[in-house]
């Protein structure tokens, strides 16, 4: 049984060969110091919100950075309702859900899940700038997988479920993007997931049986120019690429694929 996260789906869809290098060959990428510091701050913010939700001391985390204190205060002022505990609601941070499909175990870790009798809200903290277009978020595998898993593993129908991203560092105050869900989207996600899984199964079988590589993307996509695996793929270019690093959320939530 292979564990699959939204990150796996994203890389697999973007470039199957990159998936092979990252998860099958377990090649790691360098993280530059600036990125590392942002990653740490993002991880600390998630930890802060988790500990706060559990009622554990948060002072040691806040002491690491004044920025964390600013972000948390801004969130408390902007959306106080998010932090109120109602008698008819159930809530949990870092809530884990899994769903088995064929030989794959899909896994989602929700930053905060709030359940009421007639609706379910997925909350996700982002410590990087809000994307320009909401459509980009609609198409993210994190959005699609998290909504799909909740609908499949609960009594809620799609129209009762929503996903809200909170972009903490937006100025002058945090901003949210709420994504609602429909039965049509649910069916589309299921169809896309099964199609992607079918391909993954074939690629994994060929890789494990004969050592065949996963497919590369076409040069015309422009992806190779900024890919840290360009030399490995024999697609080097003149300008050295910036190393691509995982976001804080990815690192914090990244389950490993046991191959
Ligand atoms: S260089 Fe191109 S083909 Fe190779 S892993 Fe990167 S994006 Fe994929």
Image: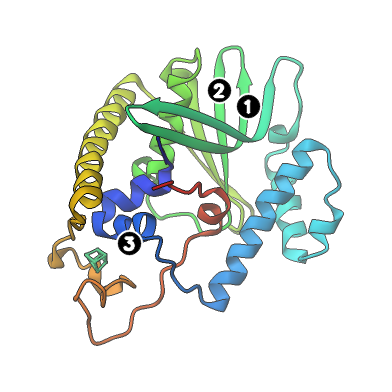
- Between the C-alphas of marks 2 and 1, the distance is 6 Å
Of helix, strand and loop, which one carries label 3?
Answer: helix
Q: Position of residue 128 (x, y in %)?
A: 53, 59
How many residues crowd mark 3 within 10 Å: few (<14), some (14–19), many (20+)?
A: some
Examine the image and state in which quarter residue 84 appears.
top right
- Left or right: where does residue 95 sit relative to residue 205? right
Which residue does the image show at 56% across and 58% down from the upper left? 248
Which residue does the image show at 25% across and 43% down from the upper left? 200
Of helix, strand and loop, which one carries label 2?
Answer: strand
How many residues crowd mark 1 within 10 Å: few (<14), some (14–19), many (20+)?
A: some
- In depth, the one of 167 and 250 nearer the eye is 250
Whether label 3 lies within 8 Å of ligand 1 gets the answer yes
Whether residue 20 is visible to the viewer of this picture, yes or no, is yes
Which residue does the image show at 42% across and 33% down from the upper left? 105
Residue 114 is tagged as: 1
Q: Residue furthest bottom?
A: 238
Whether residue 172 is visible to the viewer of this picture, yes or no, is no
- Left or right: where does residue 138 sit relative to residue 161? left
Where the N terminus falls, by quadrant? top left
Whether label 1 lies within 8 Å of ligand 1 gets the answer no
Residue placed under numbered mark 3 in the picture: 21
Q: Position of residue 114 (x, y in %)?
A: 63, 27
Mark nearer the viewer, 2 or 3: 3
Q: Position of residue 158 (x, y in %)?
A: 42, 20
How many residues crowd mark 2 within 10 Å: few (<14), some (14–19), many (20+)?
A: many
């Amino acid at each position: 049984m292979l564990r699959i996260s939204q990150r796996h789906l994203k890389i697999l869809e973007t470039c199957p060969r990159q998936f092979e290098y990252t998860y099958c060959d377990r090649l790691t990428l360098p993280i530059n110091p600036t990125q590392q510091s942002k990653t740490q701050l993002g991880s600390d913010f998630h930890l802060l919100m988790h500990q706060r939700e559990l009622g554990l001391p948060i002072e040691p985390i806040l002491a690491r950075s004044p920025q964390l204190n600013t972000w948390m205060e801004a969130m408390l002022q902007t959306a106080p309702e998010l932090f109120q505990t109602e008698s008819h609601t159930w809530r949990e941070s870092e809530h884990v859900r899994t769903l088995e499909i064929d030989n794959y175990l899909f896994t989602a870790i929700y930053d905060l899940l709030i359940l009421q009798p007639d609706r379910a809200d997925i909350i996700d903290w982002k410590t990087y700038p809000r994307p320009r277009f909401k459509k980009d978020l609609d198409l993210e595998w994190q959005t699609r997988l998290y909504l799909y898993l909740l609908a499949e593993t609960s009594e809620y129908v799609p129209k009762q479920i929503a996903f809200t991203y909170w972009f903490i560092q937006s100025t002058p105050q945090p901003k949210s993007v709420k994504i609602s869900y429909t039965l049509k989207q649910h069916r589309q996600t299921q169809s896309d997931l099964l199609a992607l899984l079918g391909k993954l199964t074939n690629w994994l079988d060929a890789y494990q049986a004969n050592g065949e590589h996963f497919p590369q993307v076409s040069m015309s996509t422009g992806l190779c120019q900024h890919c840290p695996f360009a030399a490995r793929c024999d697609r080097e270019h003149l300008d050295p690429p910036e190393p691509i690093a995982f976001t804080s959320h990815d690192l914090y939530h990244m389950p490993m694929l046991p191959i």
